Amino acid sequence: MKRANCTEVKEFVFQGFSNFQEHQLTLFIVFLALYILTLAGNIIIVTIIHIDHHLHTPMYFFLSGLSTSETFYSLVIIPRMLSSLVGLSQSISLECCGTQLFFFLGFGITNCLLLAVMGFDRYVAICNPLRYSIIMNWRVCGMLASLVCALGFLLSLVQAVAIFRLPFCSSLIEHFFCDVQPILDLACATPLINDILTLIISLLAITAPATFLFISYVLIISTILKIASAEGRKKTFITCASHLTVVIVHYGCASIAYFKPKSENTKDQDQLISVTYTIITPLLNPVVYSLRNKEVQDALYRVVVRKTLS
């Protein structure tokens, strides 16, 4: 769709939360508190996994990677958003916007792929327990972690370069950070190739791993149902419950955000969805894996007791 009066744009101005002027201080306090909890929770998880040798397993290796990625994912977006809420920095240069988009997408896609790898780890552990240590050895774990990180940032680079090669006709971003669709809406013309590229990357980053996880959990649940004792079934399912909770929320929010028809786009709806997957979802990971995971709770207790005694 062409726009008239195309002028060279050198910076963007965020218009996020402009409909909530009287509540911006309240939003700042709430989001700052959630951000601090997110940072603290993820840092605690990474530290506990690193210190406690009982958690030196593939499952917690990937959880540590997810917590690290979630920490940087939040760091890319939330500090600038908080500064915008208190009026310190409403504008952003094209270069900084492109950098934010690149890292936001890179860590976001990496998170999606890491959740799929964690699902594969649970599948092997439950469906092929005798071969688990052979299949999920440390060399394989390292390769999988490196692969998903490289793929995530490669797809992010392709998307960012394709978007910022476009000419822009407006500098007002109807959002609180540089996301794909709000930036494309500012372009003087959006070529079909950009829409196709966005769809392909969304399919690779969301649909493909979500489908893989769905198939994995069908096989996992069918295996769990074959366990003779009810206690055994319950214990086995609990090992997957935390991961499954994070997966449902993470992919659910991402699917709504990137597959919602354009005709349904509204500023307030988009911002509400974005708040969910940029603030709530990163907080969900440490909450679910710390409050509902007995192994992490026990490890935290051991570390606290050891520090107290020393």
Image (cartoon, grey):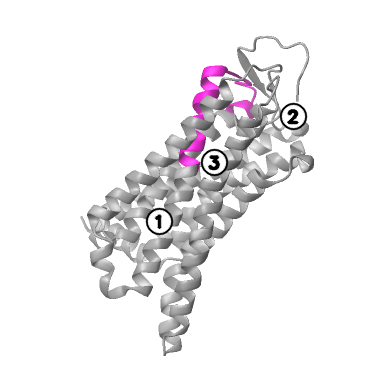
Amino acid at dot 2: Ser
Front: mark 2 or 1: 1
On the rendered structure, is 208 left or right of 87?
left
What segment is highlighted magenta in the picture?
Answer: 83-108
Residue at coordinates 57% horizontally, 53% vertically from top-left? 251
Q: Quadrant of residue 231?
A: bottom left
Amino acid at dot 1: Val
* Residue 177: mark: none
Residue at coordinates 53% horizontally, 57% vertically from top-left? 210
* Residue 18: mark: 2
In the rendered image, residue 65, in percent from the top left (x then y), is placed at 37, 48
* Residue 117: mark: 1
Q: Residues within 10 Å of mark 1 (few under 14, many from 20)?
A: many
Amino acid at dot 3: Ile
In three-dimensional space, the C-alpha distance between marks 2 and 1, rounded to whole angstroms, equals 39 Å
Instruction: Identify the element where label 3 is drawn.
Output: helix
- Within the magenta stretch, is there residue 236? no
In the rendered image, residue 40, in percent from the top left (x then y), is placed at 43, 46
- Within the magenta stretch, is there residue 107? yes
* Residue 201: mark: 3
Q: Earlier in the sequence, mark 3 or mark 1?
A: 1
Q: Quadrant of residue 227?
A: bottom left
Residue at coordinates 53% horizontally, 62% vertically from top-left? 245
In three-dimensional space, the C-alpha distance between marks 3 and 2, rounded to whole angstroms, equals 30 Å
Q: Is residue 89 above or below residue 285?
A: above
Q: Label the magenta part by its dominant secondary structure.
A: helix
In the rendered image, residue 283, in percent from the top left (x then y), is placed at 52, 50
